Amino acid sequence: MQQDKPVADLNLEEAREELARLAQLLKAANRAYHTDDAPKISDAEFDGLKRRNTALEAAFPELLRDDSPSLQVGAAVAEGFAKIAHSKPMLSLENAFEDVDVTDFDERVRKFLEHESSLFYTAEPKIDGLSLSLHYRNGKLDHAVTRGDGAVGENVTENAMTIADIPKKLKNAPAILEVRGEVYMSHADFAALNARQIEAGEKVFANPRNAAAGSLRQLDPKITQSRPLKFFAYAWGTVSEPLARTQFEAIEKLSALGFKTNPLTSLCSGPDSLLEQYHAIEAQRATLGYDIDGVVYKVNDLALQSRLGMRSTTPRWAIAHKFPAELAWTRLEAIDIQVGRTGALSPVARLAPVTVGGVVVSNATLHNEDYIAGRDAKGQPIRDGRDIRVGDWVQVYRAGDVIPKINDVDLEKRPSAAVPFEFPEVCPECGSPAIREPGDAVRRCTGGLICPAQAVERLKHFVSRGAFDIEGLGAKQIEFFFNDSDLPVKTPADIFTLERRDAANPMRKLKNRNGFGETSAKKLFASINAKRQISLDRLIFGLGIRHAGEQASTLLARHYGTWVALEAGLTQAVEGNSAWAELIAIDGVGKVMADSLVAAFQNDVERSAIDRLVAELQVMAVAVPAPVNSPIAGKTLVFTGTLEKMSRAEAKSRAEALGAKVAGSVSVKTDLVIAGPGAGSKAKDAEKFGVDVIDEEGWIALIGQA
Ligand code: IVH
């Protein structure tokens, strides 16, 4: 059998076949175990298949399947939902707050689509609930998945089945249809639910959205059934045939299929009519009977939507125009300084509790020392230069989920004893000097890993959702282990030695400690061990290096491919050498980020923490799914000069969608230069490096667009 062959001896076709077979086997095994409660293979066999699958994916990252078993993270554990990977990511939306953000959006779209004269948009309420994806097969509701982190959500099928607005069967539907929309609760149902909760001595929900989320994510579908949830359809994911030509018609189609769609959805011809619609919807907000927090605008023509494509987490063809924030006045009781993961000293306002838009607020951010002093980063006055003092009467505002902020201060109510706030110049946690680098609005503790606040925040970041996402090891547990003298966890590597250290300690076993039992200790070790295999992008993000966020981590992982290559690159990089040039040439990596990465990899203390961690892990290469038949997949392109048929932004996004990288300058790594009229030095560089050059017509022919 092929499976006996070492991975290194397999050719591409053999690997492809085996991955397909493994996907099927593992899926069947998962179903037998979790859904039917009737396992067909042993745990050891299951683990063996999974390991083989991982090894194959690591050796052939280009073969990563959409339904890869390694993307189907986890499974139905006793107290959780099974996880399901979305076949297309569930995106979030860029926000607009001011009218000018809307005209900017329209301009950006027009610029991207250059030469596209007729542009229509839809406008519809932004429902304040939680999004849900519904999968229909041959007209039958097959499964329902929450948004989760956008890539992987939770299987809440049984619960979705209890929602009356969600059709269980469809007539004349495409064979495969994924409908997306919002689960929400009406004001009346919310009030009645809270009244029932109070009567039963149960938890009271803060707002309808929390109530909807809490109700959908119930492990017992009977509880969900007893909660009055509603659903509006407004988008779709994978479909076996197009729904329509336009957004508006697609929504009409969903409505004809039996979904509830929002009656306030309308078609608009440009920014003016979008704003008119915004105000019309805002005027009805209070009488709708359910919460909305803005208006969503979407490009109507679906072909244009697909040309516009998406950024990493938001589409270019839509924007959410939010309603203005909610305000309240209260007293500022204290200003505390919190030290974050990167050493930033953040002032936090402690407030006399006040209700803002239905939520009780007692903490708010004060941004930084300049903000408190009443000036911006350039030294210009803000709030007409009024500073903020402890004891002041301050205005609090919150917009949606955003952390509440202090907006203004009432000088007439200032107590006579109030004194200007003195921002500390040493770290309140470790006493190291806290300094401001030129151009940085933030004062930072210079203690690095010796600062307990930085160390513990880094650990919290390390176990967080976008990073290692270790189940059962959240902020609370990190605090516990950080301060524990038996099993201290001071750096990420210590998490992975917990089980070994616990086994070696005959006395105070974790299972016998307060708050832990045999099962929970075992579970914790298992969920830690499950993350020993980690993808390169998550590892980079988990390290919590300043400026290396989630998006940058993905870029780096895609560029270097493997840990070995990344580590070599960042260890060798010194401004001026080729490793540095390679790093800085990655589209999206600037000098500031490069400096920060190099500093982390070349600092002894940081580096030894990284090395000890990686020694505990198996780092998986990151796949760049190469589209089939793309002549530019895996190539590095440079655009120069003017393009006439499409904007530079569209050309870049097309190239990336076809698996190519787009770089800003020509180097030995460049495979192809696309030069339009007016191309300057880059065309000359191409000649120097012997890189092929084509014109725009050649480019269009290459990507197969007339
Ligand atoms: S469209 C690709 N339309 O807002 C765009 N989203 O902030 C997908 N939401 O995650 C979303 N009402 O949960 C869209 N009419 C609407 C919406 C809506 C509410 C939510 C949705 C999304 C979030 C983004």
Image (spheres, helix red, strand yellow):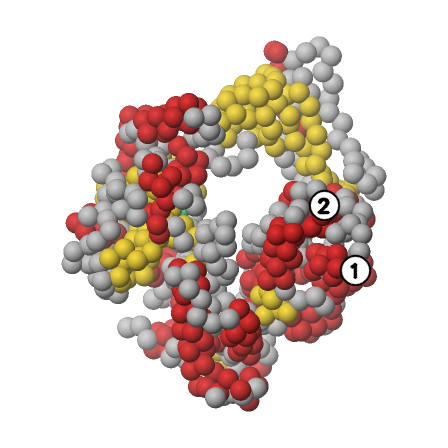
Query: Element under label 2?
Result: loop
**Residue 685: percent from left, percent from top:** 56, 77
Residue in the foreground of this view, choosing between 556 and 359? 359
Q: Which residue lies under the disc numbered 1?
A: 504
Residue in the foreground of this view, choosing between 310 and 683? 310
Q: Quadrant of the rendered structure where residue 238 is?
A: bottom left
Query: Element under label 1?
Result: helix
Estimate the spatial distance between the alpha carbons at disc 2 and disc 1, rounded to whole Å: 16 Å
Identified at 19% across, 48% down, the residue is 258
Q: Which residue lies under the disc numbered 2?
A: 513
388 relative to 439, above or below: above
How packed mark 2 is, by other alpha carbons closer than 10 Å (few <14, some 14-19, many 20 or more), is: few
Amino acid tagged 1: Ala
Identified at 67% across, 17% down, the residue is 391
**Residue 223: percent from left, percent from top:** 38, 39
475 relative to 30, above or below: above
Q: Report how many numbered discs are placed on residues in the image.
A: 2
Q: Is residue 170 left or right of residue 276?
A: left
Identified at 51% across, 37% down, the residue is 402
405 relative to 685, above or below: above
Residue in the foreground of this view, choosing between 345 and 240? 240
Identified at 41% across, 34% down, the residue is 211
Marks 2/1 in contact by CB < 8 Å: the verdict is no
Is residue 703 among the parts visible in the rendering? Answer: yes
Q: Is residue 267 left or right of residue 506?
A: left
Q: Is residue 604 left or right of residue 624?
A: right
